[in-house]
Amino acid sequence: MIRLLKKLSLVFVAACAALPALALPAPMSEQELMEKSDLVALIRVLAVTCTSIVKDEQTGEELPGYLATLKVLEVKKGEVKQGEQVLVTWRAIPKTIVGPWAVYYYPGEEVVTHLTKRSGGASYASTWSNAKGADVKAPDSRDLPTTPGETVAPTPEPVKRLPL
């Protein structure tokens, strides 16, 4: 009986080793992120638009693509000026995939992020899965649009008025 259990456990271990690894890639160090990024900045997310819905070939899940408009509040690296706006794009990942492969941006959040310029130069993408730091200012909500053409914007900040 013990021999049978040993053989079964060896077969089980061998079978597990033969399966493809579903681990996350290691996060980049702060130095690597800085070196590989075209833009490193404190940004505020002004709006997020759902640009498309694409059916995933493996899972059949319908995955939205997004375009976010970011206002640059402070530049740490890059040729963008403070106050300018940049666009960042990303696609959602299937819910069954392990790990935070996609970096999401939410309306109203303020955060330091690392971005690389996409080919063609019209928009950016996150440099790596850990490209976004901790929120400097949390978003109003983490709800994103779900229909192509739909845009979600943060709650407008109240205008400061001085008494007469």
Image: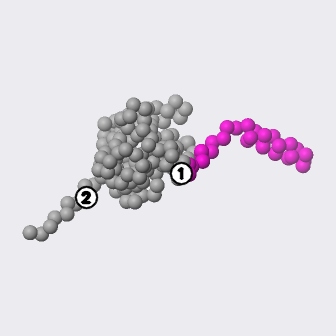
Q: Secondary structure at mark 1?
A: helix
The residue where tag 2 is placed is 157
Q: Which residue: 45% across, 48% down?
A: 114
Q: Which residue: 91% across, 46% down?
A: 3
Dividing the picture into quadrants, the one containing residue 134 is bottom left
Q: Which residue: 38% across, 52% down?
A: 75
Amino acid type, callout 1: Gln
Residue 68 in view:
no
Q: How is the image coloured?
A: one colour
Location of residue 34 in the rendering, given as x and y in whole percent from the top left corner = 49, 49
Find out whether residue 57 is within the magenta segment.
Answer: no
The first of marks 2 and 1 along the sequence is 1
Location of residue 149 in the rendering, given as x and y in whole percent from the top left corner = 31, 36
Which residue occupies the extreme left position in the image?
164
The residue where tag 1 is placed is 31
In the image, is residue 160 above or below residue 61? below
Q: Specify the label residue 20 is tagged with.
A: none
Location of residue 96 in the rendering, given as x and y in whole percent from the top left corner = 55, 42
Location of residue 78 in the rendering, given as x and y in whole percent from the top left corner = 40, 46
Q: Secondary structure at mark 2?
A: loop
Disc 2 vs disc 1: Cβ atoms closer than 8 Å?
A: no
At label 1, counting other C-alpha atoms closer than 10 Å, the crowd grade (few under 14, some 14-19, many 20 or more) is few
Closest to the observer, 83 or 55: 83
- Give the mark toward the camera: 2 or 1: 1
Amino acid type, callout 2: Glu
In three-dimensional space, the C-alpha distance between marks 2 and 1, rounded to whole angstroms, equals 35 Å
Q: Name the side, left or right, on which 35 lies relative to 146.
A: right
Point out the image quarter for the C terminus.
bottom left
Q: Which residue: 37% across, 44% down?
A: 79
What segment is highlighted magenta in the picture?
A: 1-29
